[in-house]
Image: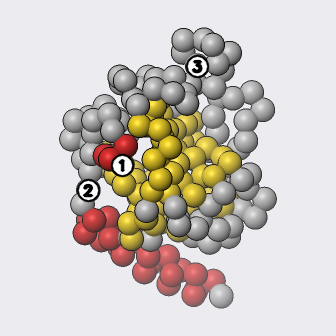
Amino acid sequence: AKLDFGRKEGLTLALWLKPDADNPRDVPLLSALNHLGSPADAGFGAGRELRLIDGELELRLSNRFPAYAVIVRTEGAAIRPEQWRHVALTYAGGKNAAAVRFFVDGGEVAVRVLYDDLSGEPAKREFLVGADNAQDGARWRGALDGVRSFPRALDSAAVRARFAAGALPRALGALDRS
């Protein structure tokens, strides 16, 4: 399935991540947000982006960043270097921050809404993985695995099941290496 935030049925993005110790404090995981040009340009800040900021996850859906956007950040995700974590983002569709939910290791994480004023459909561009198009932008350092999208917003039980299905093999693999 494509990562299409315009679907009225919503979407789910699930992945495993493990930041390196020297990972930047603010780094894109997936970015299709336009960081080029002047903030005064009409296309500046238009797009979609998932970032890791000081151990928290942030989703940005924007027509013109930071205004005319939905920006939602987790509170308590506690993503730390050198630890594998399962992350899932569900988006129920629409143009409101209330449609966004985050899960870490199968459990829902509280969020803080930074902006809730998306006026239209965010620009659709191809996603960059671990980078954005900003000049001298930070680059992801670490591992991403099992990236999967679903063409609907999964419920809590389905997200927990996705985590459980991947957690046991990952833990057994870690035991084999020790």
Q: Earlier in the sequence, mark 2 or mark 3?
A: 3
Residue nearest the observer in this picture, 29 or 97: 97
Q: Position of residue 78 (x, y in %)?
A: 58, 68
Q: Quadrant of residue 20?
A: bottom right
**Image quadrant containing the C terminus:** bottom right
Residue picked out by circle 1: 100
Q: Quadrant of the N terminus?
A: top left
Tell me the quarter of the picture where residue 70 sits. top left
Q: Mark 1 belongs to which amino acid?
A: Val
Residue 44: mark:
3
Q: Indicate whether 103 appears above or below 38.
A: below
Please tell me which residue lies in front, 110 or 20. Answer: 110
List x then y, in percent, for residue 159: 32, 64
Tell me, yes or no, if residue 46 can be seen here. Answer: no
Amino acid type assigned to the residue bearing label 2 in the image: Leu
The residue where tag 2 is placed is 154
Q: Amino acid at mark 3?
A: Phe
Q: In the visual, does 130 lie left or right of 68?
A: right
Could you say which is closer to the camera, residue 130 or residue 54?
54
